[in-house]
Image: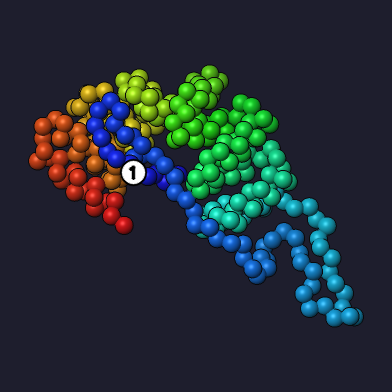
Amino acid sequence: MRRTRHSRSSGREHAIDEFFGTEGLEADPLPRQPDASFPLRPFAASATPDARVEAPSSEPIDPERVYQRALEAVEQARAAEADALFHELLALDPAHVGGALGLAGLLESQQDVPGALDALAAALKLHPDHPELLLARAGVRRRRKDLAEAESDVRRVLRASPSNPDALMELGLVLLRKGLAAEAGQVLMRRVEQRPDDAETWLYVGEARNQAGNLPAALEALRKSAELDDRNDRVFYLMGRVLDRMGRPDEAMPMYRRSKELSAP
């Protein structure tokens, strides 16, 4: 999901909010013309009195086909159509995990956080310990700063799978939001051990070390992140912050300029 920047402040509660957020998809009404790929065939539009009118297909609707169409609508920013298709899918198959995840993500992107949580709660009634559903709910809760509930969801996943890399990432982010930087850094390094080439994990390790005051180690982690992905403006901005804190403003300024270049539309 896309990120939204907020104010950048230093200290223990440095706003990692700049790293998180969602973007709303522009509403797009359902097409007025018949969609040839829709699973039901329409009645013939130009039937004459002697013409044979084709009845709707008696074949069952394929939920997976509806799901793929919903995903395509999301990719093409046709939010209203995607919403309708996800609801159609879940009416056909209430236990469809992908449909619940897709609907929740769409609703959160439209700032309907209660709706997103409701969609995930309904799915979790059918799949109480499903790791993807629990982690999705943890992410929504973290972004709205319900940190205790978010951590509870993540730890449910880790009890069943202590090395789950996605759960380790989510727990690290929750701990960062709680201001527990040293603990967050330790958790994120466990993920690094599994995913050493993941630039985003190194970024958050750098943020955790920055918050903990371990500036040389923070700079090392951020440089590693930049080596893996040199197109991420957040990495260069944070490197500038760390270099400023280390009393090296001449080295910080090129980092800020690079961050601004990368973030320009």
Asked which quadrant contains residue 98, the reply is: top right
Q: Position of residue 249 (x, y in %)?
A: 11, 38
Q: Amino acid at mark 1?
A: Arg
Q: How many numbered tags mark residues here?
A: 1
Vertical relation: 110 (above or below) 20: below
For the point 81% across and 63% down, which residue is it? 56
Residue most extreme to the right: 50
Residue 222 x/y as whole percent:
26, 35
Q: Position of residue 116 (x, y in %)?
A: 56, 40
| Residue at image point 42% right, 42% down | 21
The reply to whether residue 30 is visible in this rendering is yes
Look at the numbered disc 1 and give the secondary structure of its residue. loop
**Within 10 Å of the Cα at label 1, are there few (<14), some (14-19), or many (20+) other Cα atoms?**
few
Q: Is residue 244 above or below residue 112?
A: above
Q: Is residue 87 left or right of residue 162?
A: right
Q: Residue at x 9, y 41 (%)?
A: 250
Quadrant of residue 170 within the rendered picture = top left
The location of residue 6, given as percent across then percent down, is 33, 41
Of the pair 189 and 262, the residue shown nearer to us: 262
Which quadrant is the N terminus positioned in? top left
Which residue, given by chain and number where applicable, does mark 1 sit on?
A: 5
> What residue is rendered at 44% in x and 49% in y?
23
| Residue 68 at least partly seen | no
Left or right, 248 with respect to 14, comes to left
- For the C terminus, the image quarter is bottom left
Q: Is residue 172 left or right of residue 29?
A: left
